[in-house]
Amino acid sequence: MQAMKESILSTHALSKRYGQRTVVDQLELQVDRGEVFGFLGPNGAGKTTTIRMALGLVEPTAGSVELFGSDVRTHGAQVLPRVGALVESPALYGYMSGRDNLRAVGRVLGGISESRMDEVLEVIHLRGRDGDRVNTYSLGMKQRLGLGLAMLNDPDLYILDEPANGLDPAGIAEIRDLLRELAAQGRTVFISSHVLSEIQQICDRVAIIQEGRLVTLSTVAQLTESGGEFIVIVERPEAALALVRTQPWGQKARLEDLQLVVPSPSGRGRDLVQFLAGHGHWPDVIRERQQSLEEIFLDLTGREAR
Amino acid sequence: MTATSISERGLSPAQARSPRASFAGAVGSELLKLRKQRLNWVMIALAVLLFGVMALGLGTSDQRQLLAKSPHTFFNNFLDIWTTTFQIGSGIVLLLVSARLMGMEYSAGTLRILLARGQGRLQLLAAKLLVLISLGLLLLAGYVILVGAYTAGTVIVLHGNLDPLRSLPPVAWQNLGLAALVQVVSIVCAVLLGTAAAVVGRSLAFAVGVAMSFYPADNFGALVLILLRSATHQSFWTKPSDVLLGANFNVLLQTLEPDHSSRPAFAVPVDHVDATHALVVIAAWAMLFLGGSIVLLLRRDVNQ
Ligand SMILES: Nc1ncnc2c1ncn2[C@@H]1O[C@H](COP(=O)(O)OP(=O)(O)O)[C@@H](O)[C@H]1O
Ligand SMILES: [Mg+2]
C-alpha cells in the first residue's frame, strides 16, 4: 500500500506574459505534503513571478495555482494564512523594532500571543535585539526576521524565494538547518534558488525552469548523478588520461588546465583513486566536480556546453 | 539554530494555527504602525506650539473694544481664523500621514507580506482609512476643546465674565456647528486624497509629493484661471474653476451658513456657486479618490 500523496501546491498551465514577453510559460508543478521542493533557475527565469502568482500577488495571464487544493485567486483569504512566505529581499517596517514588526503582522493574522513571538524570536536568534529598530539590523538579521514573520502562525507551507541571497555561508547554513527542522516536523517547503549547491542538500525534488519553461523535474540525486565527474591532479596528467581513456567508463575523460577531469568507474571517488593508484598514478588531489547549474541547464536543454 | 530548538520551544500548533484574522486585528496593526512613526508625534507637538504662538498674537487691545461693541463680530472673527487654521493645519498633517501610511507599504515592500499572508486588499485599505479618519476626528475634538478653552479664557480676561458669549444669536452657534461639519468633510477628503496618491504612484515619495502639492496647485490653478479670463475676456475660463476641489472647499462653509458671514480664504470658484454645487463637487472628488484606490488596488499586480 502506498501512502496517499496530498498535493499542497500545484500549478496548472500557469502562464504570465508582460507585453509580448512570456515570462512564465505553461508551468506544471506539484508539491506534496512534507516535501522540501527546490525551484531552480538562472536569474530572470521566472521564479519570483511564479511565486508571486502562487501568493495571489500577481494575476496569471492563463492557468492557475492551487494551494491545499483550492484556487488561490478565489480562496486566497482561506488558504494564504496557512502559507509563510518570503519573497525576494526581506520587506520590513524599518522604523519599527523587530518585535513590533512581528506584532504588526501578528495582529493581521490574529491570535498571535507575545509568548509565541518570544518563541519565534528565539528560533531566529533575535531575542536580544528585538527591541532595536530594524533599520539597524544586518542583512542576515533582516532575512531571519523575514523568516520569523513567515513562521508566526506555524504555517503548513513555506514558500521561500531565494532566502539565501546576500547571506554568508554561515547564514546560509543556519537557514538550511532551520528548514530541515521545519521539514522534519512535517511542514512543506517550496524554496527557490539560482544556485544548486545552496539547496541540493535539503531538497527531495527539484524543478528547473529556464525562460519560464519547466526544463526538468527530478530528485537531486538523479540530477547530480548525470554529471558525476571528478577533478584529479596527478604528476603526469597526459599519461593518466591515456590510461583512463582505455577503460569503458573513461571515454569522456579529458584535460582542463592540466587537471584530469574523469568519471569514476563506480561513481564513487575511492574506486577512482584505487584504479589510478593501482596503475602508478597517485593522485595529489581529488575532488568532485560540481556541475554548475548553468552546465546542467545546457546539458538538459541539449545545447553544446563546451 | 539547533535541530531541537523549534521542537523544544513547542510550536503549540493548535493555538498557533487557528484562523483568527479579524478586521479589528487589521485596525490594531495600522494603529501600531501609525503610533510608531515619530514624525507624527513631532507634527502634533509643532501644531500645539503653533497654536500657542497664534493665541498669543491674537490677544490685542482692540479685541476688548470689539468684544464690547459687537460680540457677534468678535465671535465670527474667531471662527474664521480658527477654522481656516484647522483646515490648513489638519489638511497638511492628514495628507502627509495618509500618504506615508499607505505609501510606505509600497516602498518598503511590506504590501506583499500583508497580502501574501491572506489579508484582503480591501480590508487593508479599509483599516487604514478607518484609523486615519479616526485620527482626524480625534485631532478635531482636541482642537475644539483647545480653541473653546482659549476663547472662553479670552472673553473672561477681556470682559470679566462669559456674558458676551451668552448674548450671541442662535445663528452664531449654528455656524459653529457647520464649521465643525465642514472640517469633518475636509478630514475625510484629505485622508482619501493622501491614500489615493499612494495607491496611484505606488511609492512613498510620489505619494507625499502629490499629496502635498495637490491643494496648492488647485488654489494656484483657480488664480491662473481668473487671470486668463481677464486677459482673454473669455468666460470659458471660469468653468474649470467651478469644479476645483480646493476652491469649492474654500467657499463651502460660507455657502452653508444661513447668514453667509464667514470669509473664504484663498482661491474660490470664479462663478458664484451654492452649497449644493460645492457639496456635489467635493463628493465627486472624494468618490474619485476612493473609487480609484479600490479599483487600482484590486486590479493591479503587486510587484513591490
Ligand atoms: N512587472 C514586470 N514587468 C515586466 N517584466 C517583468 C516584470 N516582472 C518580472 N519581469 C521579467 O520577467 C522575467 C522573470 O523575472 P523573475 O520572475 O523575477 O525571475 P527570477 O526570479 O527567476 O530571477 C525577467 O526577465 C523580468 O525582467
Ligand atoms: Mg527572483
Image (cartoon, coloured by chain):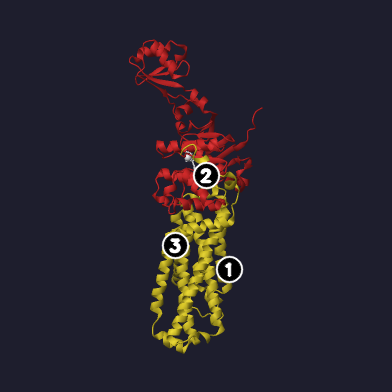
Please state the horizontal and vertical placement of residue A164, each as a whole percent of the image.
45, 38
The chain assigned the colour yellow in the figure is: B
Q: Which residue is mark 1?
A: B280
* Local secondary structure at mark 1: helix
Give the color of chain A as drawn.
red
- Whether label 3 lies within 8 Å of ligand 1 gets the answer no
Same chain shared by disc 1 and disc 2 = no
Amino acid tagged 3: Asn
Drawn side of residue B33 relative to residue A81, left or right: left
Which numbered mark, 1 or 3, is in the foreground of this view? 3
CA separation, marks 1 and 3?
Answer: 32 Å
Amino acid tagged 2: Met
* Local secondary structure at mark 2: helix
* Local secondary structure at mark 3: helix
Residue A151: image tag: 2
Please state the horizontal and vertical placement of residue B85, each as a whole percent of the image.
45, 72
Please state the horizontal and vertical placement of residue A124, each as a whole percent of the image.
46, 43
Could you tell me which chain the residue with mark 2 belongs to?
A: A
- Front position in the image: A264 or A302: A264
CA separation, marks 1 and 2?
Answer: 49 Å
Q: Is residue B244 visible?
A: no
Seen as rendered, the residue at the extreme right is A1
- Front position in the image: A153 or B3: B3
Seen as rendered, the residue at the extreme left is A235
At x 53% / y 73%, what residue is drawn? Answer: B180
Amino acid tagged 1: Val
